[in-house]
């Protein structure tokens, strides 16, 4: 189980999973929060004896059945720097995880904003290139800097945000930046919950309102497979 940081919108959904699934280990940045959700979460972790390694003791790379998980951020000593560097708050201390199988990869940057994006580039810039990018901080205008996007250079951007949320996520300027760079955009606020699966060669994306796959995308024998988008009765195609 992976907790990027202890803000409620990233934490609260994990309580049910920790309680009802066979979780053996929790990855986190080890930051605590004075919230009811965090306290209840840690009670479950303790009661079910789920192992929580310290960030400094965690391996930065794990391989599970040919799937590689890389912990790219934050730096091991970020807690020691928080008093002097005030920008190191919950969002900017998020775990950043890259998951890869074959030629396909997914970057999960939590809620990092511009300052943390720049530090991440300086630390692991060469490792950021990914097929899918989960939009940092839900598509906030404080994130997705041009230099960060140049390093990741994704095919798809996933925006996790609530319908007509009070924060205005995703910000129009960020959407414009994504569109200008030719990214295919998937949004939970307008498309609902969707699933993405890959065998390391091709990718399937399925919307809840679709009878068939939204995308079938990949490479086989050096040519791009044709795919179709099926969304709520509308069918789009692209070679």
Image (cartoon, helix red, strand yellow):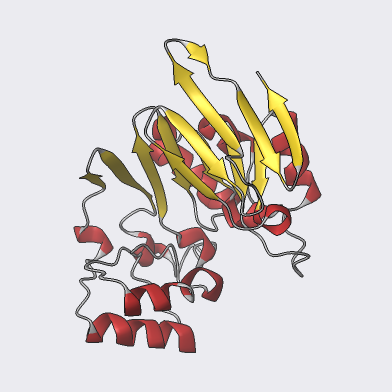
Image spot of residue 62 (x, y percent): 23, 47
Image spot of residue 103 (x, y percent): 39, 27
Relative horizontal placement of residue 184, taking residue 116 as reference (left or right)? right
* Quarter location, residue 237: top right
Q: Nearer the viewer, residue 134 or 16?
A: 16
Reply above or below: 174 against 147.
Answer: below
Q: Residue at x 22, y 74 (%)?
A: 50
Q: Is residue 168 visible?
A: yes
Residue situated furthest top in the rendering: 222
Reply above or below: 163 against 62.
Answer: below
Q: Nearer the viewer, residue 200 or 47?
A: 200
Image spot of residue 129 (x, y percent): 46, 31
Image spot of residue 11 (x, y percent): 47, 73
Q: How many marks?
A: 0
Q: Residue at x 40, y 27 (%)?
A: 201
Q: Residue at x 51, y 38 (%)?
A: 204
* Quarter location, residue 163: bottom right
Relative horizontal placement of residue 103, taking residue 62 as reference (left or right)? right
Q: Quadrant of the N terminus?
A: bottom left
Reply above or below: 59 against 83.
Answer: above
Relative horizontal placement of residue 34, taking residue 177 as reference (left or right)? left
Q: Quadrant of the C terminus?
A: top right
Relative horizontal placement of residue 62, taking residue 232 as reference (left or right)? left
Q: Is residue 129 visible?
A: no
């Amino acid at each position: 189980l992976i907790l990027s940081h202890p803000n409620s919108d990233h934490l609260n959904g994990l309580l049910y999973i920790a309680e009802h699934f066979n979780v053996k280990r929790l990855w986190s940045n080890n930051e605590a929060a004075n919230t009811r959700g965090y306290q209840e979460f840690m009670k479950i972790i303790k009661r079910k004896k789920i192992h929580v390694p310290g960030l400094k003791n965690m391996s930065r790379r794990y391989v599970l059945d040919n799937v590689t998980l890389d912990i790219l951020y934050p730096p091991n000593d970020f807690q020691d720097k928080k008093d002097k560097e005030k920008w190191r708050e919950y969002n900017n201390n998020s775990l950043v995880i890259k998951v890869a199988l074959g030629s396909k990869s997914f970057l999960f940057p939590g809620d990092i904003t511009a300052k943390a994006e720049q530090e991440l580039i300086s630390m692991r810039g060469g490792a950021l290139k990914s097929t899918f990018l989960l939009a940092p901080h839900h598509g906030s205008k404080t994130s997705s800097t041009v230099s960060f996007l140049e390093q990741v250079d994704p095919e798809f951007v996933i925006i996790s945000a609530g319908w007509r949320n009070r924060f205005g996520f995703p910000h129009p300027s960020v959407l414009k930046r994504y569109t200008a760079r030719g990214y295919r955009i998937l949004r939970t606020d307008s498309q609902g919950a969707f699933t993405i699966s890959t065998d390391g060669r091709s990718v399937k994306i399925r919307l809840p309102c679709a009878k068939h796959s939204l995308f079938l995308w990949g490479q086989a024998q050096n040519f791009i497979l044709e795919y179709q988008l099926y969304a709520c009765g509308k069918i789009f195609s692209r070679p």
